[in-house]
Image (cartoon, coloured by chain):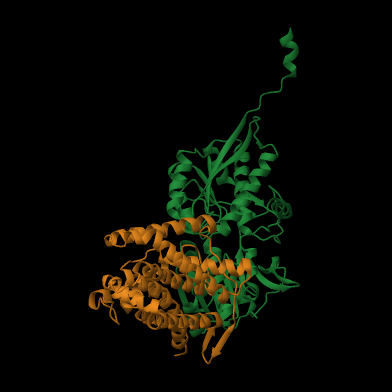
Chain colours: A orange, B green
Amino acid sequence: MDFLLSSLSDGLLIGFIYGVAAMGLTLIFGVMDVINLAHGPIIALGMFGIYLTFNNIGLQPYIGLILVAAIGLLLGIIIYLIVVRRVLDAPHLSTLLATFSVNMIIIGLGTAYFSTAPYNVDFSLGRVSLGPITLLGTRVIGALAAILVTIGLYLFLYRTRPGRYIRAVANNRNAAELMGVPSNKILALSFGLGTMLAAFSGGLIATFFPFTILAGGSYELKSFVICVLGGMGNPIGALLGGLILGLIEGIIPTIMETTWVPVVEFALFVIILLVRPSGLLGAKK
Amino acid sequence: MAAEETEPMEEPATEEVTLVVGFTSSITGKYEAESGRQVRGFNLWMGQVNEAGGTTLSDGTVVKFESVTYDDESTKERVQELYTRLATEDNADLMISPYSSGLTAAASVIAEQYGKVMITTGAADDNNYMQGYTQVFQIYTPASRYLAGAVDLLAATDPTISKVAFVYENDNFSTSVVEAANAYAQELGYDIVLYEGYASDTTDFAPFINKIVDSGAEAILGGGHFQDGSTFARQISEKGIDINYLALLVAPPEPAFADLGEAALGVIGPSQWEPLAAYTPEFGPSSNEFINAYMAAFEGEEPSYHSAGGYAAGLVLQKAIEDADSTDPVAIKNALDAMDMLTFFGSIKFDTTPEAHGLQIGHSMIYIQWQEAEGGLIKQVVWPAEGSTAEVLYPIP
């Protein structure tokens, strides 16, 4: 029982981070029907952002995260304006190839600068013991930060004018444009927010796991599973999907070898696609 | 007449031969740390031999060396491609293995296929030498003998311990080490309460640590390479689990392991070589000479056993050429078969049976532990007892 509780708590904490990473992917898909294949490298850039601000400038990682998020937002807007905008109305394959090219560019530049060697942010917040459960400070703060970001995103989307514009564009871009919504700016902002969330989640992961420039790939794959689980284009569904995936990662090791985790995760991916393709909370209409 | 006067002045013509030594290094990828040191060790040997005027054969031929090397990105695919290129386009005369058993397995096939003598270093997996190869020679103690001493040390330190967990990287080398250590531990009567591998790119060890706690293990053996091993040790320490004994492969002997701080304290690791090891070499430099030259050449970097292995690989090639008194590949191969020498790295002798040709049978492991010293942590040799420099720190604080 202690084992199960420890595993579940670890899984749940990492699940929040998975949720934020997937929210970035699902937000972009929901607003503009683009599957962002540069999602993984942007997560990795978030990791390196924290590494550089912590090691070179001496910034506390959670302050560094603000900088990483701001750069993530800006980077997303730039990627949208230079690459995505031009192929937005082309067939899906064009946007896939365009974002895949961005993926390759980031990985290429990152490899040239950082190599593919592992890096580590040597930062600890100690641990908290609650009976049989030992929680690491960095993971607890990571989960809290993920919750705050989710609340912030929710408030932004539902309580601000740009947020309402984003939802309007996601529902029907043509109708939104007819109502005077500056769709191009809103699409750029949405792509920026998506990459900001990816970079932010990468920054959180860097506070407790080592990473390489290729490390975002596995989180990108998990994000796909989560998006399908929670419903493509549904940010709240993404958080729920992240938590479910985290719990699965917590439960599987208690009943079988840990190497089975990806097998179960991707089997679930296929099952959801077959049985409930709209995800648990329903995909965007 | 003039010719008769000048003839005695002429030096007998000495032929200079430059042998091309081909290898790949992991400039990028997960083996960057270990491979970098291995290559620096090899380059130091090559620089020293060439600066000293090369190796002279009995017929006056001076043999010098030059290397051709590429980045294998720590992947088998690149190794296969690049060793083929080394053999066919760069016309390498001799080869050194890449770092790691997995990459070396890929390189060995190519070396054997093109009939190139290859000295393997940083590659301990026994299986590579059970393939019927005749050109591949290992200088590391084989994986099957890697953790046996750690089990012996545990038995000698605390006979009351009975529950052991093996958590290891799922690659050729680590699996082969742990299979042998597991069999040996069971032979000694240990109860193996957990035996599980992890993927090479694992960064989250929480599931394994939770399993270790649940299993009631008192000792952990396993690990794999530097990155995963140091992450594993760090996360064990962060979780603060109650464990008495932790022995991991590869990572602990690396000087950079001390950067983990208190997470490194008490961790034991098998090492192919340590600066403290006081062998009296029959060939090549002493340990101190090697260490001083290495630190002078590489900005004060302390050599690890990977560095020493790289240097020793060059030394073995040099000795084989001197023993063969020839640069003929067949003669060099025969000299390696007959080799039995003591270097600063330890004894070197190869199995010559068809079943395990090239397997190292002369060299043995030593076991280090990170202990507290004034101003930080230092490595101490804790096993074998006759070579130890300090009492083992037990249980882990």
Q: In the picture, residue B56 is in which quadrant?
A: top right
Front one among A165 and B254: A165
Residue A16 lies in quadrant = bottom left
Query: A265 left or right of B110?
Result: left
Q: Residue at x 64, y 55 (%)?
A: B308
Q: With respect to residue A185, does A164 lie above or below?
A: below
Q: Position of residue B51 (x, y in %)?
A: 69, 40
Indicate the quadrant containing the C terminus of chain A: top left, top right, bottom left or bottom right: bottom left
For residue A157, above or below residue B350: below
Q: Is residue A86 visible?
A: yes
Q: Position of residue B153 (x, y in %)?
A: 62, 73
- Name the one closer to the observer, A139 or B224: A139
Measured as percent of width and height from the top left, residue A119 is found at: 55, 65
- Residue B373's quadrant in the figure? bottom right
The quadrant of the image that shows the N terminus of chain A is bottom left
Going by the image, does A101 lie left or right of B6? left
